[in-house]
Every structure is written in C-alpha cells, then in structure tokens.
C-alpha cells in the first residue's frame, strides 16, 4: 500500500527522513525511560512489587490498545490521524508525572498514558514497511536511527544523572515527546482504499506459523523481563554508578546498531527462521552470563549480545509478520506482534520478576530468564523442523505421483 502523493512524486527519500526522525525521537525518549524510570521509582522508595506492577501495567496497555487502535486504523483507513492523536495525548498525560511521587496516582497516570503511548511503535513499523516497498530487507537502515538516538541518550544521561538527580528524566521525556508529537504531523498519509466491513485475509494472522511464532516471541520477551525491569537496579546493587549503567546500556545498543546496518546482507544470506532460532539461543546464553557475572568486562560482553537478542530478533520479527499479514491488515499485523510479544510477554515478565525479585534476588531472575529463552527456541526450532520435513515429504509425493493426484491422507498412511 504505497504512500499517496509523496511516494508517487518520487520523494521516497524525504519520507524515509521523516520516518527516521520519528525513530530517532521515539527511541531517544525510550533511552531516558527504559534504563532510568524504574530506577527513579526505586529512589522514590517503591518496592519491587510496585515497580513490577507499574511495568506490567504499561505492558497491559501494549497488549490491548495497539490492537484496538490498529483495527480502527485499518478499518477506516485513518492510521495517520490516530498516530498523531496518540503522540499528542500521551505527551500531555506524561506531564502529570511531574506533580506526584505517590504510587497510586502514578499507577493511574500509567494506565491513561499507556492507552495512547502503546500503539505508537506498531504504527511506526507499519509506516516503515509501506515506505520501503520492495526493499523491506533494508528495514534496519531506517530503524538504526532509533538505536543511534538510544545510545547517545544513555551515554550522556548517565553522567547527567550522576551530576544532578534521576528526577531530571521526567522533564527530558516530556521534552522529547513534544518534539516527537510535533514532527508526527509530517508523516504522510496513505492512499485511500475501499472500506469494507471486514478485511478478507485478516484471518491469516491466525495461521499456525504465525500463532507458533507469537507464542515463541511471547517467551522471548518474558525472558527479557528481568533485564528491562531490574538490570539498572542489579548493577547499582553491585556497586556501579549511573555512568557505568549508561555505558552498559550504550554498549548493548552500539552492538545493535552494527547488526542493523548489515540487515541487507544478513537477510540475503540467512532465512528469517534461522535468524530467529539463533536469536533465541543467544538470548539464553546472555541471561546465563548475567547470572554469573560480577566483573564489568563480563557484563559488557553480555551486553554486546544484545545485537542478537534484540537486534536480529526484532528485525526478523517485523519482516516475518509483514510477510504473512495481508495487505489490508498490515497495521493490525504489526499491532498483534507488538501486543503479544512486547506487550503481553513483557507484562508477564515484569510482573513475575517484580514478584520474585525480593524473594530470590536479581541473579536468580537471570537464570530463570535463560531457561525461558531456551524453551522458546526449542518450540520454534521444533516447529520449523517439522514444517521443513513436511515440505520435503510433500515435494517427494509431487515428484512421484502423476499429475492431478493427491498425496495420501494421514489415515491411509497409517493403514
């Protein structure tokens, strides 16, 4: 579904620049939020359960609202207006964090903020897939601007927090969100398509390969729960300051940037299935390293593996879902992917890890995370192996049987 006007006039480079700026600002804000918001809550005196609950609520929003907004966008062809609305509304709601340090008001703000913040990234992914057209394997070259922004943010911010206070993150997130919302109005619209009561082919999102992948992706993001919720706290408890915490996050994203810049070569050489399976196995190894690691060098080595556990996994996931989703349900397809993996998966991961943190400590949380990642990889690899064997078997039947004949049914094979 090409962009109207801008794309027909050959201004694809301009469209990519606008979308790249959206990634830059979105992940710049995330670079403030992700490493430091839970740390901010920790400094307010919140318990591990309360921190896990706030994180889980954000993930609940990531499950529900991308699906709602995505379905509305595809049904009425209003992806761009909803995208702009969600940017401005979420920015306005974030401002309320400036006026309270109490848990229950922050819980309420988190709920309303999540309603509008949740769909932004899935909509942005759908815009990107449309802008790239037949060059979707170069997705990483646009998405990398988000990673560059993230690494710059966490590198600088760690030093700023050491000099001042972690409270500064609220103002910085508000400022970044305002810029993101302002530039969101420059994202071009889509061609008008004929409205239908139901988009034929949307049921393809319920096919077995998609369902299996979403289940495995769910497990992958559950395994990330300890990392995203407690990694900064884990490092602080080991005696590291905010500067090293920022460097650790930056090292992860630097590795991610390198692999995203090579996205064309990566996906021309390896299948999406192989990239996904490899990502699961590396994730398991990464969490087990953090289970043992105390020294800064080993911790930074584990962070470099983020290139695979997030970088290759994320790119392959976006391409995998885009390949299977029908043309008229691309927004919904990306929303489903984000909802069930980054939404539901992280929600469960945050809540369970928040519940267990004060009982078993952060080291054991990473051990459990490693086992969960192994489970996701085994499930995905087993399904892919079974699928390939079936394809080989069907191909053999087609070569041996005369034209027009069908392979024997499973019941006849058993006879």
Image (cartoon, rainbow, N blue to C red):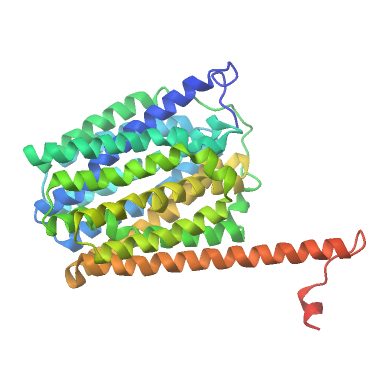
Please identify the residue farthest to the left as the structure is shown.
Answer: 164
Q: Is residue 48 left or right of residue 195?
A: left
For the residue pair 369 and 260, the one nearer the viewer reads as 260
For the residue pair 59 and 106, the one nearer the viewer reads as 59
Please identify the residue farthest to the bottom as the structure is shown.
Answer: 415
Q: Is residue 93 left or right of residue 236?
A: right
Q: Is residue 190 left or right of residue 246?
A: right
For the residue pair 244 and 16, the one nearer the viewer reads as 244
Q: Quadrant of the C terminus?
A: bottom right
Q: Is residue 70 left or right of residue 177?
A: right
Instruction: From the top left corner, tell me how far across and down residue 214 is, in percent.
Output: 50, 58
Query: Would you identify the image quadrant in which residue 26 lies?
Result: top left
**Is residue 274 at least partly visible in the picture?**
yes
Instruction: From the top left corner, tell me how far across and down residue 413 is, in percent.
Output: 79, 78
Query: Would you identify the image quadrant in which residue 167 lies?
Result: top left
At x 49%, y 34%, the residue is 128
**Is residue 67 at least partly visible in the picture?**
no
């Amino acid at each position: 579904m090409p962009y109207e006007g801008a794309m027909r006039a050959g201004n694809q480079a301009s469209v990519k620049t606008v979308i790249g700026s959206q990634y830059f600002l979105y992940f710049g804000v995330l670079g403030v939020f992700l490493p430091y918001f839970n740390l901010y809550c920790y400094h307010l005196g919140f318990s591990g359960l309360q921190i896990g609950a706030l994180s889980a609520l954000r993930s609940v929003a990531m499950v529900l609202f991308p699906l709602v907004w995505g379905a509305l966008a595809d049904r009425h062809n209003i992806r761009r207006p909803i995208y702009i609305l969600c940017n401005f509304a979420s920015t306005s709601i974030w401002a309320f964090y400036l006026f309270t340090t109490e848990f229950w008001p922050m819980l309420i703000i988190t709920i309303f903020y999540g309603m509008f913040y949740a769909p932004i990234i899935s909509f942005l992914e759908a815009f990107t897939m449309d802008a790239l057209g037949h060059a979707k394997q170069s997705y990483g070259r646009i998405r990398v601007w988000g990673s560059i922004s993230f690494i710059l943010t966490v590198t600088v911010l760690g030093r700023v927090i050491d000099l001042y206070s972690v409270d500064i993150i609220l103002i910085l997130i508000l400022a970044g969100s305002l810029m993101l919302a302002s530039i969101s109005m420059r994202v071009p619209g889509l061609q008008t398509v004929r409205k239908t009561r139901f988009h034929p082919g949307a049921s393809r999102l319920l096919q077995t390969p998609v369902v299996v992948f979403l289940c495995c992706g769910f497990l992958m993001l559950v395994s990330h729960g300890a990392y995203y919720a407690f990694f900064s706290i884990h490092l602080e408890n080991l005696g590291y300051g905010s500067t090293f915490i920022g460097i650790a996050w930056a090292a992860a994203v630097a590795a991610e940037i390198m692999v995203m810049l090579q996205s064309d070569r990566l996906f021309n050489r390896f299948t999406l299935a192989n990239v996904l399976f490899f990502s699961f196995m590396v994730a398991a190894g990464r969490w087990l390293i953090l289970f043992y690691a105390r020294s800064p060098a080993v911790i930074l080595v584990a962070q470099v593996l983020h290139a695979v556990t997030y970088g290759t996994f994320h790119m392959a996931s976006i391409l995998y879902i885009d390949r299977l989703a029908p043309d008229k349900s691309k927004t919904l397809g990306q929303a489903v992917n984000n909802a069930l993996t980054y939404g539901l998966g992280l929600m469960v991961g945050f809540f369970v890890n928040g519940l267990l943190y004060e009982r078993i400590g952060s080291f054991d949380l990473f051990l459990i995370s490693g086992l969960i990642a192994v489970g996701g990889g085994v499930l995905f690899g087993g399904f892919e192996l079974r699928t390939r064997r079936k394809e080989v078997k069907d191909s053999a039947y087609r070569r041996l049987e005369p034209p027009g004949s069908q392979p024997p049914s499973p019941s006849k094979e058993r006879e």
